[in-house]
Image (cartoon, helix red, strand yellow):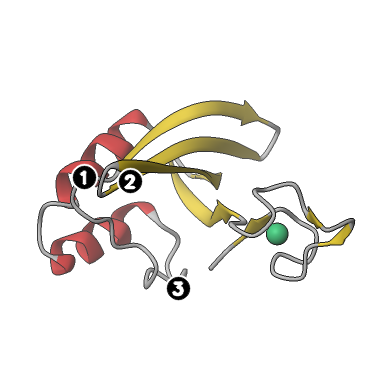
Amino acid sequence: MNDYFRMRTEFSRASSAKQAEYMDRFVRRGYGTSHWVMEQGDTETIASVRESEDATEVITKCSRRVEKSEHTWRGRYRIARAGESWEIVSIETECFVCDGTGTFSGSDCEVCKGKGWSSD
Ligand SMILES: [Zn+2]
């Protein structure tokens, strides 16, 4: 998994065609990749990994510098075993409206439907 993020950062500097090629290698076929373009200067590191019987959940910390300030958010990946290897089956990002809490102004957040995560 660490390799994955290292490569991703590498490829973020390459063309989007290269990124697509790379996504093919790691992500389950048919899973949308349209949201997947990293911009130069973005970083993403693994914050925690939780394994269960048939899947692994990885929480990451992403950051992007916007002029003089730094914007940070979390990502959540679900990874399933695929034979000897593994593949990413879902990619979600922390809801930017409720900051991942799932509630906004005392009721369920309308953007993420109370989940705290959105899959774009
Ligand atoms: Zn929300």
Residue corresponding to mark 3: 30
| First reached walking from the N terminus: tag 2 or tag 1 | 1
Q: Nearer the observer, disc 3 or disc 1?
A: 1
Mark number displayed over residue 41:
1
Image quarter where ligand 1 lies: bottom right
Q: Badge 1: how crowded within 10 Å, few (<14), some, or many (20+)?
A: few
Residue corresponding to mark 2: 64
Where's residue 8, x and y in %? Answer: 26, 46
Give the residue type that dot 3 points to.
Answer: Gly
11 in relation to 23, above or below: above
In three-dimensional space, the C-alpha distance between marks 2 and 1, rounded to whole angstroms, equals 6 Å
**Left/right of residue 26 with respect to residue 28 in the rendered view:** left
Where's residue 40, x and y in %? Answer: 18, 51
Question: Quick one: 5 or 37, which is closer to the camera?
Answer: 37
| Res. 16 image quadrant | bottom left
Give the residue type that dot 1 points to.
Answer: Gly
Q: Badge 3: how crowded within 10 Å, few (<14), some, or many (20+)?
A: few
Q: Is mark 3 within 8 Å of ligand 1?
A: no
Give the residue type that dot 2 points to.
Answer: Arg
